[in-house]
Amino acid sequence: MTSREERLAAVYAAGDREELERQYRSWAAHYDADVFAMGYSVPGMVAAMTARHLPLGASPILDCGAGTGLLGVLLAGLGYGRLTAMDMSAEMLALAERRGIYESCRRMVLGE
């Protein structure tokens, strides 16, 4: 059993895309609990900035690097719709899709 710190370190240590995908695949089930325990606040900050700069109802919104959909949950809660999740990890996207807030979930890699 690996700790959250070890899982995060493995992601940062990945030498190529295949290894990074492998690390996210193994981390997906623990991701939400791990990042919350580490004080991860980026989704909340991005949701706040979205609410500040985009009128409610602005759409569509692409959640790049959506992971498990933490940002999407916040955006949907604020009233934004027509959300699309994009992530390189099929396992992370599967968790995002189960949340039922995304119009679509697309497995893609930024820059490709």
Image (tube, rainbow, N blue to C red):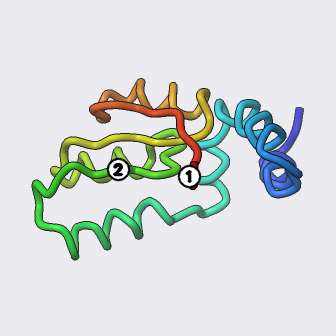
Q: Amino acid at mark 1?
A: Leu
Give the structural element (helix, strand or loop) at label 2: strand
Name which of mark 1 and mark 2 comes first in the sequence: 2
Residue in front for this viewpoint, 53 or 7: 53
Q: Residues within 10 Å of mark 2 (few under 14, many from 20)?
A: some
Q: Position of residue 76 (x, y in %)?
A: 25, 46
Residue 47 placement, left or right of 38: left
Residue in front for this viewpoint, 4 or 50: 50
**Quadrant position of residue 45:** bottom left
**Quadrant position of residue 37:** bottom right
Residue 87 placement, left or right of 49: right
Q: Residues within 10 Å of mark 1 (few under 14, many from 20)?
A: few
Q: Which residue is mark 2?
A: 62
Q: Which residue is mark 1?
A: 110
Position of residue 7 relative to residue 52, above or below, is above
Q: Residue at x 39, y 66 (%)?
A: 46
Q: Residue at x 22, y 75 (%)?
A: 52
Q: Position of residue 71 (x, y in %)?
A: 40, 52
Q: Position of residue 84 (x, y in %)?
A: 34, 41
Q: Amino acid at mark 2?
A: Leu
Position of residue 72 relative to residue 40, above or below, is above
Quadrant for the N terminus in the image: top right
Q: Residue at x 41, y 24 (%)?
A: 98
Residue 61 placement, left or right of 41: left
Q: Nearer the viewer, mark 1 or mark 2?
A: 1
Q: Position of residue 34 (x, y in %)?
A: 67, 47
Position of residue 52 relative to residue 102, above or below, is below
